[in-house]
Structure formats: C-alpha cells, structure tokens
Amino acid sequence: MTRRRAGSTSRVWRKALALLVLCAVSTVSVSANAANVEGMRLWAAPDHARLVFDLSGAVDANVFTLDSPSRLVIDIDASQMGTDPRTLPLEGSAIAAVRTGKRNGDDLRVVLDLNREIEPRHFTLPPNDQYGHRLVVDLEYPGENAIENPIDPIESMIREQEIAAQRASVQRSIDGVDGREPAPPEDVAATKAQPHPKRDIIIAIDAGHGGEDPGAIGPSGTREKDVVLEISRRLAKKVNAAAGFKAVLIRDGDYYIGLRQRTELAREQKADFFVSIHADAFASPRPQGSSVYALSQRGASSETAQWLANSENRADLIGGVDGNLSLRDKDQVLRGVLLDLTMTATLNDSLSIGGQVLDQLGRVNRLHKSRVEQAGFMVLKSPDIPSLLVETGFISNPDEERRLKSASHQEHIATALFNGVKGHFERYPPPTSLLAWQRDNQRGPLGDEYRIRSGDTLSAIAVQHGVPVSHLKQANDLNGDVIRVGQVLRIPNS
Ligand SMILES: [Zn+2]
C-alpha cells in the first residue's frame, strides 16, 4: 500500500515546526490528526458485519445509534472521504444504505441506514504488514449464532454429559493417585442402563483466514482464504453425507474470525475433532506437497514447522482482532494436572488422526513431510478437542497453485481428509456415538462378551458373571460409568 510521505521539508524547517507544535499542542494536534478515508471494506458474517475504514493516519471516532428509522452514526474527527461508499457490497449485511456528510466544519459523518437490530463495537488498529491505520466498526447481531448450522440442543446436551463424565473420571484417577478417597463406584454401578443416543460425531472444519486476512497469495494471485473455504465446504459435504457424522463449518463465508474464537466455537459446538485447513506459502517457490500439524507445547519439530506456525499465528494482526477478544479464552477452566492429562490424551488422539489423514493425503498428493509435524499453532490449543492443522499444499509453488484451484484436486483432498478422520473414528468411536452402537450391534457377542439390555445395571451384570465391578469397568475402559443399552461389555476372567 502507498503511504503519503512528508515532503522535502528542510531539517531547519522541521525543527521550527516541532517547536511550534510544542508551543501550541492543542491547536496543532487537530490538524495533525487530519486523515483521509482512503477505502472502505465490508464483510458479512452470520452474527455480525464488519466495516473497515482504511485511513491515511490515526483518528478519533465516535460511534452511536439512532432510532426510528434505525441508523448507526460514525463521526470521524477532522477527516475527509476519499472513496465512494456506494460501491460497498451491502448484501447480506445489516446495512441498507450508506450516506456521508460534513460536520462541525472539518469532521466526517458517516450514517448507515440499518435493516436489523445491531449492537455496535468499534476500535482502531495500527498499521501492519498489509494495511495502514484502520477504524473497525463491528455491527453485532444480538442472539445470532456465529455458526450457520449449529448442532442440535439435545445432541449438545448428550455431549455435555459425556464430557462431564470423562472429566470426572480423570479427576477420580487423580484423587486415587493423590491417596484421597476415590468416589465410591457402587452408586453409579446401580444406575440402570440408559438408552443409546447413537449420536453423530461432530467434525469442526475451520477454513483458515478470511475477510481482511487473505492468507497466502499465489504467484498468479490465488488467495489462500478462497481455496481453503472451497476445500472446507467440500469436506463438510462429505462429512454430512456419511451416517453418524456431522460437520460444523467454523467459517462459511468471506469474513475473519479470531484464532482463539475459532477454537472456542468448536468447543461451543461440542466438536469431537477440529481441523483447520490452509494452503500456505514459503519464501521460495520450490516447496510443495501437503503436511499435517499437531500442537507442540515444547517447540517446533522442524524449521518449516516453526516458520509456518509463526506466519499462521500472525493472522490475528492482519485479520484485525481487538486485543480484548483473547479475554474470552476459557482455557482456565481446566487447570494443572487435569489439564496436563487431558492435553496428553488429546494430543495422542490428534497424532493418531493425523497419521491416518497423512496416509490418505499421500494417495492424492505429494507429501511435504512424511510424518505428522508439531508446532505451537494457536488454533490447535484446545485442551480437550483433538485438533489438526492441514497445509493442503504450497500456494507459492506455481504448479501446486494451479492444482489447488482445480475442482477435482480439491475434491481429492477433501476425500482424503474425510477418509483419514473416518478411519480413526471407526476404530475408536466415542461411546455414545452411532458408530460405537454399530460396532457393537453388527455382530453377535463373542463368548466372553455381554450385550447390555434395558434394565441392566453394572452391579447386576458384575454379580451375574461373578466379577467385581471394578474389574468390569477396567476391562471396558468405562470412563463415564454410564452404561448404554446395546453396548457390548467384555467380561474379564475374575
Ligand atoms: Zn494459512
């Protein structure tokens, strides 16, 4: 972007000017703040619209709403409009029309006519690698979900219970190690078998970048944010077409979501797995091929991994996230040992899924690295959701850029991603999932197995087979204590 530079003012002149500024700060500062609105950009998300003013300098702004008719007024001090706001793509946003005018002589007033209820929020951003000074005005829609197709509330409740039970089980094992009295298992063992929910496995698909953050740009101008959204939508289609799976698209349009907010949305949607899809660039055009990343808390597994993690983590700077957003981080709910144990289990799952995904990707594309790499990517920092970041290819490689744009290659990548994920969950289905139910019910129980019937309790089954409840639980990895009708238990030798 071009920046206006001070003219060829002589040194003496500048010194004199500086003195003048010192002497009359109040009067000079007004004109020093004068800015030109060089451009306006608008992004429509399901739960908000973002209006960005690109400015030639820093400004002070006042933003407020007016009723009947409903309007949002944006007053920018000592500024001029240097762009035509009528070219803004208003469709799908809360804005029906944009008008501008002068106020108090040299202030700029921008009035947005609104077609729905909004809550405004605004902040300014300093220049970064891609943009200069910006005033960001977010029009948030109260009560609206950031996800276009959120999961069903009942499904969400089942997941909530499952997650709580898993946490309680980890907590009990910690208490056991600490020498504290673990909770008596007999109470839960007396609980009757519950109906099997046969729930869907939720796959959160995060198309990287978006909105004012284009991501990497290929030699012929292909934007990472566009390619990865297309691959994400293809993947979502495949997930939704498979019985027992449901996709949640974290981003389903051209707008930016903060990195922490992406993982938070996945948690709100009770995702079983989170995958962030990218197509990145390197400083040289040579590197090519797909790679798969899991989180590393300790440091990157290679220099490329470190380089990519740094460039991905910079997205918030370009995407224009207000620093306050990170306060929404709820990670502090899980602490200490519990966090450690959960994260280790989560990372093991991530690496297992990553291996399957890499294996599948290797069938449709060259691999940049033949094992799952690890680095400190911000979007992978969910303590309890297995997460991967997939670099589908290097958009900086002209050949790969062309392939990434092609529908058939995108389709192949999406298929490979889904096959990898499906492969993992078929082997390790969550206990309340349809896949777990199918695994248990598509074959008769073997000699040392028992299929749970309606009315059964864990203690009754234990008595019936002459084994202690604790052995039964251990043999079946029953971390939630709840048993389900149709579930098959392995009966250990007492
Ligand atoms: Zn990226």
Image: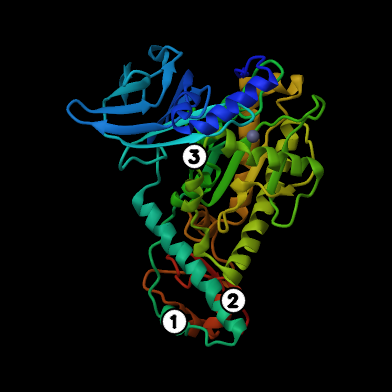
Occupied quadrant, residue 494: bottom right
Q: Which of 346 and 362 is in front in this view?
A: 346
- Marks 3/1: CA–CA distance: 44 Å
Counting from the top left corner in percent of width and height, residue 136 is at 45, 31
Type of residue at label 1?
Ala
| Element carrying mark 2 | helix
| Element carrying mark 1 | helix
Query: Mark 1 or mark 3, which is nearer the start of the sequence?
Result: 3
Q: Mark 2 points at which residue?
A: 474
Rendered-image quarter of ligand 1: top right
Q: Nearer the viewer, residue 267 or 71?
A: 71
Counting from the top left corner in percent of width and height, residue 77 is at 40, 26
Query: Mark 1 or mark 2, which is nearer the start of the sequence?
Result: 1
Q: Name the residue under label 3.
A: 250
Local packing at callout 2 (Cα closer than 10 Å; few below 14, some 14-19, many 20+) is: few
Query: Mark 3 or mark 2, which is nearer the start of the sequence?
Result: 3
How are the residues colored?
A: rainbow
Taking the image as shown, residue 219 lies to the left or right of residue 50, namely right
- Front label number (2 vs 3): 3
Q: Name the residue under label 1.
A: 460
Indicate whether 135 appears above or below 406. Answer: below
Identified at 38% across, 57% down, the residue is 157
